[in-house]
Image (cartoon, helix red, strand yellow):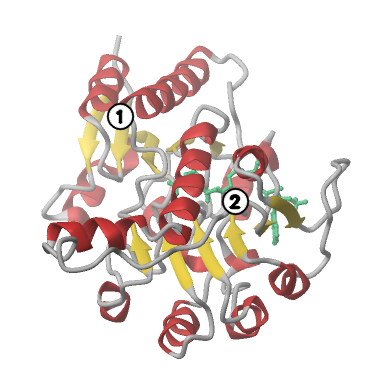
């Protein structure tokens, strides 16, 4: 039987590529030196596309794939996929919800602890040999502080559980109030003004671009910390740099950035900022579970069965 052609548009783990190669003829667009030639020669044959959560599956790329039937995103966020365009062309889209929730929530908790207890700074302090000179300065206890979560979805709820376990008070903002016993704030500014830690956990994309702006950071205030484990596009990065430089907010813990893998040079020089290279889901266990979900969706598509985890808009 002729195997269908599949385009890989992000850096994927070998264990996923090996699984994909069992059912598809795979072409590595991400590492291809001459991407235009690859699209010109093979574009018309491509039936499936696999990339990461942060990948841009733009209309120029998809326009060069006239036979593409399915995009299987190796991630839960699909803000890089033009959903109305896919709906129009009948392209199916799947993602990997749930299996990564705990890892990302763990990372949010870790960033709260790292910023409040100044753990990265104190680690650097010890390595630099300063301990014998003088004890590391006091930090702050997260227990009793207020954590405002923007986007109380799967990950937001798992973050709330973890932060409650260390004694924090939780509030949230979203487009709709939910049936949960947590204080709801209709506006991000109101949530920020209430919060000691403002935690970004909503989807990226045009609907949330720069919703954490200078005004929101001013409302968070000089004792406030921003944590972002969602998408860099949600935070106005220039406004964040400026708020940190001017002591408009106290600290930040960031796993995601506006132009990854670029990180503003100003942030790299700041002691009160913890920076991680988008490692929210990057454990062996979770990446393997995500790979299974990608394969399960593609297998279902090939067999003509219902998809396992289609994105909500195209169910
Ligand atoms: P989810 O279950 O769909 O939750 C998203 C939440 O955001 C929902 O509660 C939704 O509630 C809210 N929301 C949507 N639009 C909003 C807006 N304009 N303003 C405020 N809230 C809004 O998604 P999830 O599984 O928790 O994932 C959340 C995001 O985390 C993903 O989209 C992804 O970008 C990010 N993520 C990052 C990493 C990483 O490696 N750092 C890993 C996985 C996921 P309403 O509909 O009521 O507004």
Up-down relation of residue 199 to residue 247 (above or below): above
Up-down relation of residue 17 to residue 149 (above or below): above
Q: Position of residue 134 (x, y in %)?
A: 23, 68
Write down the quadrant of residue 184 in the picture: bottom right
Q: Tell me the residue that label 1 is attached to.
A: 5
Task: Tell me, yes or no, whether the two marked residues, 1 and 2, touch with CB atoms within 8 Å.
Answer: no
Seen in the image, is 222 located left or right of residue 161? left
Image point (54%, 38%), residue name = 93
Q: Tell me the residue that label 2 is attached to.
A: 83
Q: Position of residue 178 (x, y in %)?
A: 85, 46
Viewer-closest of 103 and 73: 103
Viewer-closest of 150 and 311: 150
If the image is split into quadrants, where does the N terminus sit?
top left
Q: Residues within 10 Å of mark 2 (few under 14, many from 20)?
A: some
Viewer-closest of 278 and 88: 278
Q: Position of residue 55 (x, y in %)?
A: 39, 52
Q: CA distance from mark 1 to mark 2?
A: 22 Å
Image point (51%, 51%), residue name = 81
Q: Position of residue 186 (x, y in %)?
A: 83, 65
Numbered disc 1: secondary structure: strand
Up-down relation of residue 99 to residue 255 (above or below): above
Seen in the image, is 313 located left or right of residue 62? right
Task: Please tell me which of labels 1 and 2 falls first in the chain.
Answer: 1
Numbered disc 2: secondary structure: helix
Q: Residues within 10 Å of mark 1 (few under 14, many from 20)?
A: many
Viewer-closest of 111 and 185: 111
Whether disc 1's CB lies below 8 Å from ligand 1 is answered: no
Image point (41%, 21%), residue name = 295
């Amino acid at each position: 039987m002729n195997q269908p052609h599949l385009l890989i548009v992000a850096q994927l783990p070998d264990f996923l590529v090996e699984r994909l190669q069992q059912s598809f003829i795979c072409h590595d667009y991400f590492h291809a030196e001459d991407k235009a030639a690859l699209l010109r020669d093979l574009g018309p044959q491509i039936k499936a596309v696999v990339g990461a959560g942060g990948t841009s599956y733009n209309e120029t790329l998809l326009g060069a794939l006239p036979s593409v039937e399915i995009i299987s995103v190796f991630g839960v966020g699909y803000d890089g996929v033009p959903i109305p365009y896919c709906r129009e062309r009948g392209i199916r889209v799947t993602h990997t919800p749930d299996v990564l929730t705990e890892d990302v929530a763990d990372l949010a908790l870790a960033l709260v602890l790292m910023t409040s207890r100044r753990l990265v700074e104190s680690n650097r302090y010890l390595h630099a040999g300063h301990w014998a000179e003088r004890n590391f300065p006091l930090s702050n206890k997260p227990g009793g502080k207020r954590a405002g979560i923007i986007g109380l979805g799967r990950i937001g709820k798992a973050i709330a559980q973890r932060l409650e376990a260390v004694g924090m008070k939780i509030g949230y903002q979203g487009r709709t109030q939910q049936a949960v016993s947590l204080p709801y704030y209709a506006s991000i500014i109101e949530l920020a003004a209430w919060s000691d830690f403002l935690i970004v956990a909503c989807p990226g994309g045009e609907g949330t671009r720069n919703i954490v702006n200078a005004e929101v950071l001013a409302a968070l205030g000089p004792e406030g910390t921003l944590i972002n484990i969602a998408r860099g596009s949600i935070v106005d990065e220039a406004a964040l740099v400026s708020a940190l430089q001017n002591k408009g907010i106290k600290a930040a813990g960031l796993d995601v950035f506006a132009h990854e893998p670029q990180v503003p040079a100003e942030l790299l020089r700041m002691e009160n900022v913890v920076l991680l290279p988008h490692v929210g889901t990057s454990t062996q266990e979770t990446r393997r579970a995500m790979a299974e979900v990608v394969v399960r969706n593609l297998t279902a598509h090939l067999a003509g069965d219902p998809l396992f985890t289609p994105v909500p808009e195209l169910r």
